[in-house]
Structure formats: structure tokens, C-alpha cells
Amino acid sequence: MSMPSATPMTILPNRGTAKVKSVLSGDTVVLLGRAAGEGRKAPEVTFTFERVTAPRMASKANDNVDDPGAFSSREWLRNLCVGKTVTFETRKQGATAGDRVYGLLFMPDPSDKTNTWNLSVESVRRGFCTPKVLGGDVEDISNDDGGDSVEDYEKALQAAYKEAQASRAGVHAEKPLVRKIMNAGDEFEAMTLVEKSKRLCTNGSVTCVIEYVFDGSRFRCIVTDPELESAGLLYGSFTLILAGVACPRVGNPKLSPPTPSEPFAEEARDFVELRLLQRELNISLYGTDKSGVCLVGTVHHPRGNIGAEILKNGLGRISDWTIRMMSPSDVPPLRIAENAAKRSTLKVFESYAPPKLTGASEFMGTVVEVISGDTLLILPSGEVYDDESKLKKISLASVRAPRAGNEKTGKPDEPYASECKDRLRVLTVGKSAKVNVHYEKEIPFGPDQTEKRQFGTISIGKREDIGEVLVAEGLASTQRHRDDDEKSARYDDLVAAESIAKAANKGVHSDSDYKKKTINDLSDPKKAKTHSGSLIRLGNTKAIVDYVFNGSRFK
């Protein structure tokens, strides 16, 4: 199927083949042709069955309620032909047909490939459509394309109609299905669907039809899972955000001014439409976005992971906030796919370059000092510590420790700031460490000043990542990165450790009030003199050297 780019109206040949992209109703489909070249959009044509009509589908115009039998009619046709190649025969198109083509569609009988079905006739036979002309009156219209005559076609429709009436099939049944669409956020709470799907649905995943693709990672879905009928959520409609993936946004030409599409947005949407649009698939739901209306979940396709395929083809990036909702075991395929696209600089990664480091990406050294709960000073192996410049300042990659306060401004410590710093001291100071540097950042340091800081993973002994230890114990949290930020190579392990700490209500994730340890500062000479007697009487006392003023004076 081809479409001349210069003409505003899509014109089909009298006969041909095309793939069914979607089914709009029981008598109308969207046919997809072949793209004229690489990077070109494939032509689409709205194709309606000639001389038959189907019940009207739910929309805002009819208060989201189907005409009797409309959904059953659409579903029969959708299950039969979406994604498959059909043969078309046009009967009316151009100026007299408006924005669509009227004709006949043919495909092999699913139970007998040697037999060919006329989909219009088979739909009428099952009560999903009705002839526009009842009683056998046939208009005297010639048929110049050599196909079935109008009279033969009309006779087949009338015979099929009588069969459907006799068997009380489809719209001729006593009570045809009347579906009412319920919208998340209006008729039901989105989070209710998440909870009910985990409790009532097989394997915790809900069966849905993906009705519309907004962009490569946002879809409109309809619940068709009968297991949710008892919960009143059957035919619930919601927006799904694909977990772990963020695709470029498609523009909106209807806005004023119109918003353009981001690079590769159209290609990402076409890629997903070809694989997911109007397929009935299982979806695992994890939660909602900040609005509480859009749901986040994973689509389970029998032929593979659509998220990984999007990333592998460079049509999206990993979404940090949605990937945190996923099971840690489901994350590695996404990371592998994104890294492969980055190495190949595909599509959205066409300008990607690995982070440039000012020093070695890996080195050994001895931890000399802990500055804060996530930053240390390390003396590289082979260096003599005769100057502060020999020390390397390293921050734990993708880890955020509670911030220490500022006595001068009166800003207090964040909860667990001292505990995190002390735990890091116990784990690292004086020990040999292996450092893998992942990225560098400019860190604000004083008025109008910055310093270039290296961020990496620190391994000591059997502990592969000291940052993971802090996160697992609830003393630190993982850094919330932007989707295009560099991050720790062990980021997913950090997120998994944080999930466990949250579930156990450890440290910074605890609901209980934080009780800060009281520190009696004796740096004031008067206070020191008051307590000197008791300290002398204690004899040997364990203490931590927090700061060295000079060779003989410590804090």
C-alpha cells in the first residue's frame, strides 16, 4: 500500500494487501502500509466495511457507554486481525467517501487456511454487524473491478443476517453486552486497581487491552480481566507509564502555540504501536505517579521485554523514578540494553560520550580521613603523605548521606548524620581500599567557587561497596539522578539495598522520632576546666580523634 505524498487524500488501489494496525469498531479498521523509505512514516488508511454497520463504541459523545453489543463486535474483529496481513478490495473512496475508504476485507479462515473469509459477511453471520439494507433490496451498482458483484455480496449479507437472527447471536441476543468505561481518577482510584490486581488477579498481573499509545512509554489501557469484575473494575480505563523507561515526548499540534515532538519521539511511538497497540496483554502494576492518576507498570509480552527492546534500539532512556518500583531482578536486562545503545550511540544516545575523568578510573589507597557520611580523603598507594595535596577526595557514587549542620548559621544536623559518618569511619579509616571512579561533578564550594569532585565505588576487604553497607543499614539513601545523569555501576544494587532498609524501617526510613546523641563540647576553656578533674580520675578513656590541629594538639 502506498500513498502519494503530494495529495491530501489517501487513495488505495482497487486491490492489495496491508497490515491491520488497529480496529476502531466492529466495522472499521486502520490499515498500515509500507514506508516509502527508511525513516519515513508508513501510510495509514481508515477502512470501513461496505454496506454494513456495527454498534457505536463508547466515547465522550455517548457518556462512555457502548451501544448494545459494540464492544463484543470490536473485540471479535480485533482478536481476529490486529497485526495480521489482510487483502482489501475498495468499493468507494475519494471525494464521495470523506476521510476514509469503503470496501471489503479478506483473510484466511483461522480453522481452514484453504478457505477465505469475507470479514464483513462473517461479522454479520455472528451478529456483530448488520446490513445497512435489510430485506434483500439491492442497489443497481456496477462493479468494474472484477470482484464479487454487489448483488452476490448483498445476498451473502442477507443470508448471514438471517443466520444471526435465527441463532440470536451478537446484537440479536436477548441482552447484548453494554459496556460502560470508567476512568481512573474519576470513577475509581488508581491505587485501588493496583491493590486489587495484586490480590485478585492470577500471578498479580491484570489483563488489559492497550487502546492507545501516547508515546513510547505512555499508553491508554482498558481492563478486560474477568477476575476484577467482582471488584467493579472491569472496563476501567487508565494511563499506564511503562516502568523503567522514558521515551521522547510526542508534540501536540492542537495546542496554541503547537508543541513540537522531541527527537525520535515519533519513531519510538511507531515502534511500540507496531508491537503493542490493541494487543491484550498482562500488566504488572506497581504504583502511581505523583498525581495519583497514572499507573506505573510492566507490560508482559509473550515475545520479550518491550522496555528492553525500546532501550536496545536507542528509543528511550532508563527512568530512575519508575525503575525503583520494579523488582531488582527485572532491572538488569534494562541496564544491559541501555548500555549497549550508549556504546553504539544509537538514536537518543547519538551524542553520548563516556564521562571524562581527570585521573585514573581505578586505584588503590589508604583511607586517611572521613569528611562526611559519604566523602573521604584517600592517600593513593605509593604516595608519601607529606602534603594535603597528595590526598584524593572521593565521594560515594549515587549515595546521599544525611548532611551535617552548620554551627555558624545555626543549621542543625540532619537525622543520622553523625551515625552515618561514624559508621563510615569504622568501616574505612586506616584500611586499604580499592576505588573505582565512575564520574566527576563540579561541586559548589564557597561563594562563586566550585571544586571538581570524583564519585566512585569504594571496596574494602570482602565488602564490594561501602556505600551499599551504609544504605542497607538505613544510614544513607540512594541519590535521585536525572535520567541522563551518570551514576554508580552498582546503582541497582544500591536501590535494592534501600528497598530492604525501607521495608525494615531502618535508620533514615524509620517512622519513630530521631534522638540525637548529646555531645558535650569541651573546647571552651571554662567547660574544659570544670570537667578536667573527672576526666583525669577516669584514667584511660577511649576517644576518636576528630581533627588534628598540629603534631601535639588534637580534637
Image: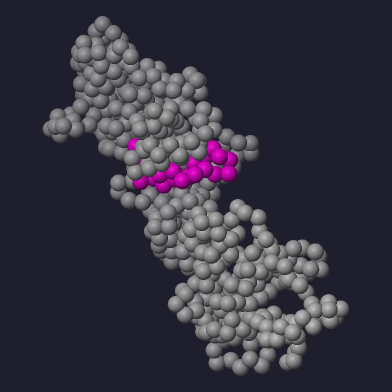
Which residue is rendered at x = 86% and y = 78% of the image? 526
Which residue is rendered at x = 60% and y = 36% of the image? 255
List the single residue furthest toward the right. 526
**Residue placed most toward the observer, 444 or 225:** 225
Say which quarter of the image contains residue 126: top left
Q: Quadrant of the N terminus?
A: top left
Q: What segment is highlighted magenta in the picture?
A: 273-300
Above or below, 459 relative to 313: below
Q: Position of residue 196 (x, y in %)?
A: 43, 37
**Residue placed most toward the observer, 194 or 488:** 194
Above or below, 272 relative to 459: above
The type of colouring in the image is: one colour
Above or below, 544 relative to 316: below
Above or below, 470 relative to 246: below
**Residue placed most toward the observer, 283 or 133:** 283
Instruction: Say whether residue 383 is left or right of residue 539.
Output: left
Instruction: Say whether residue 79 is left or right of residue 375.
Output: left
Which residue is rendered at x = 25% and y = 25% of the image? 119
Q: Is residue 56 visible?
A: no
**Residue placed most toward the observer, 353 or 10:** 353
Q: Position of residue 136 (x, y in %)?
A: 24, 7
Let me know if residue 274 is in the magenta part.
yes
| Number of marks drawn | 0
Which residue is rendered at x = 58% and y = 44% of the image? 290
Q: Quadrant of the C terminus?
A: bottom right
Q: Is residue 443 visible?
A: yes
Say which quarter of the image contains residue 31: top left
Q: Position of residue 548 (x, y in %)?
A: 72, 85
Let me know if residue 162 is in the magenta part.
no
